[in-house]
Image (spheres, rainbow, N blue to C red):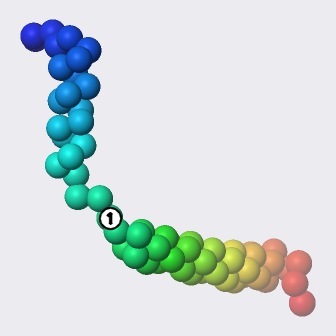
Amino acid sequence: MAKTNPFQFVQQVRSEAAKVTWPTRRETMITTAMVFVMVLLAALFFFVADQVLGWGVGLLLGAVG
């Protein structure tokens, strides 16, 4: 494998970074909001699932009722 000197490496990195399509501020905000909504939904789902399973196990073991 051919070795690249540090100056060429930096030039190549800058060249590759220029090819990246960076998201706009609006796209970033929308994506961030979507992530928060999905985290909230996942937390709610797992909370409900945990409560239902805990109630079911309690019934099976006779600890509830």
Image quadrant where residue 14 sits = top left
Q: Assess disc 1: are there few (<14), some (14-19) or many (≥20) residues with their C-alpha within 10 Å of its C-alpha.
A: few
Q: Is residue 31 visible?
A: no
Q: Residue at x 17, y 13 (%)?
A: 4
Q: Quadrant of the C terminus?
A: bottom right
Image quadrant where residue 56 sits = bottom right
Residue wearing tag 1: 23
20 to 64, vertically: above or below: above
Q: How many marks?
A: 1
Q: Position of residue 2 (x, y in %)?
A: 10, 10
Q: Is residue 2 left or right of residue 48?
A: left
Q: Is residue 32 left or right of residue 21?
A: right
Q: Position of residue 51 (x, y in %)?
A: 73, 80
Q: Position of residue 44 (x, y in %)?
A: 64, 81
Q: Is residue 62 visible?
A: yes
Q: Is residue 38 left or right of residue 2?
A: right
Q: Give the residue type at disc 1.
A: Pro
Q: Quadrant of the N terminus?
A: top left
Closer to the camera, 45 or 61? 45
Q: Residue at x 85, y 79 (%)?
A: 62
Closer to the camera, 2 or 37? 2
Closer to the camera, 58 or 45? 45
Q: Residue furthest left?
A: 2
Q: Residue at x 40, y 76 (%)?
A: 26
Closer to the camera, 22 or 52? 22
Q: Residue at x 25, y 25 (%)?
A: 10
User: What is the secondary structure assignment of the residue under circle 1?
Assistant: loop
